Image (cartoon, grey):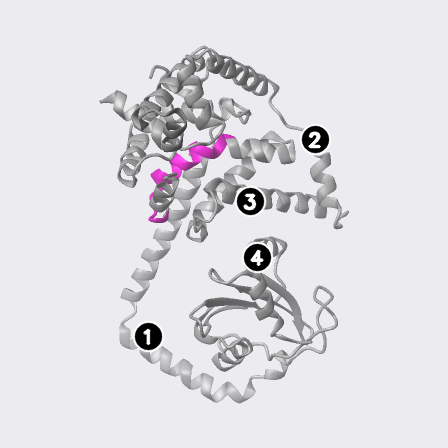
Amino acid sequence: MDNELALIELVKKGDKKAYNALVLKYQDRLVYSVYKFLKDFELSQDIAQEAFIKAFKNIEKFRGDSKFYTWIYRIAINTAKNVISTKARASEVYDNDTTDQLLSESATTSENPENILQAEQLRSAINKALQNLPEDIRVTLSLREFDGLSYEEIANVLECPIGTVRSRIHKGREMLDQTFSKYNMSNFGARKI
Amino acid sequence: MNETLEQRLSMLLDGETTPFETKRLVDEIDCNPHIKALWLRMNKQRAALKGELIDPNLDISSSVMSHLNSTSQILSLSNTQTWQFSHFFPTHYIKACCYLLGFFLVLSSPLINLKNFSPPDSLSKITNPSKTFNQNLPLPGNEALLVDLGSNFDGSLKNYRMVSDNAIEANYQLSNDEAVKIKVYFNDISQTERLNLIETGITLHTKAGNEPVVLNVSSDQISNSKLIKISNTFFNK
């Protein structure tokens, strides 16, 4: 059972702390998704930010039929299209194909190569660290992260108690977190779990 | 104790906490910087594992929350001003103003020119030119015409309100208790508003005389195909 809806329900009651937890949860994924669309890192951040603001203001419209991420992703992409359309109008070449053309051609980026390189190194290091985890922990964590199985489903697959699943996943994350400590990331705050 | 908290944070990441635990953890993330940093790292770790980490130092949460907080401050200030207004003017003064306004409206009603909103001969180029609009468009605040609009699709008017000088929002109930909302804009709308309407129901762009009119039909309970059928009832085939 995915109890993300519990977070959403708190947000619907006006709990901004719960929304902050949601923003922290999805910000990287959303910026990455918009970046794939626009190929402009700074613009992607702005659009993700606007999407989070719009989503909060319209949270009553979210009925839980889809995942929260699916819903906010749609908002972000529509916002991105809106920005592209505005750009197209400004250049006075607006027609039906212009938006798609601009989307595909917007590879002139405002990336920060240093950060992107750092992210690439971190992705590589994390995946290497995952491979070095003890097998039972690696398999349990992989079933959760890559196959999206719930704790109960993992317990059924591995024929072990759900408490074991819970502790293996936490242990795995704890071990992977040590990889982060090798990188000097000021925004990450306290290092040691 | 800390171990338990961190393990529960891991469960929150996977959506495996109860609503009660969720609330406790949310409070903990908010008030404990170490837990907040751990929550941030856990999510970045997940993003890195899935190849979705674009910048390890990315954090837009503070700007999002400060924007939301500033917006709510403006709203609460606005509410305070309304409260002060109602206390400033005595009730009998407001009542007297209402009577005068009503008297003025009764006297001036014959002067209102309904022809400005008579059915257009044809639709604008945005909609299907083979159809014609068969409905008198509702004047802002004209309840009878809103009722008439609802009769096209057997919807009884529940309530309506002016959402701006040139737009009205009316709620209807169908015989099977389904609810339908119709927004009527008595002017053309901006590109941003058009794009926002894309997410909400079915939107028709038409004209009343020479004036652009936009109708948006939406419902939380009705499928888009049924909304299209309802919107089609506004036109003669």
* Residue A6 in view in this figure: yes
Q: Badge 3: few (under 14), some or many (20 or more) residues near its Cα, within 10 Å?
A: few
Q: Nearer the viewer, mark 1 or mark 4?
A: 4
Q: Nearer the viewer, mark 1 or mark 2?
A: 2
Which residue lies under the disc numbered 2? A107
Query: Disc 1 vs disc 4: Cβ atoms closer than 8 Å?
Result: no
**Mark 4 residue element:** helix
Query: Which residue does the image show at 73% across and 35% down from the upper left?
Result: A105
Which residue lies under the disc numbered 3? A74
Magenta residues? Answer: A12-28
Chain identity of mark 2:
A
Tell me the CA gap for discs 2 and 3: 21 Å
Q: Badge 2: few (under 14), some or many (20 or more) residues near its Cα, within 10 Å?
A: few
Q: Specify the amino acid type for callout 1.
A: Ile
Query: Disc 2 vs disc 3: Cβ atoms closer than 8 Å?
Result: no
Query: Disc 2 vs disc 4: Cβ atoms closer than 8 Å?
Result: no
User: Does the magenta segment cover residue A17?
Assistant: yes
Q: Residue furthest left?
A: B1
**Mark 1 residue element:** helix
Q: Specify the amino acid type for callout 4.
A: Leu
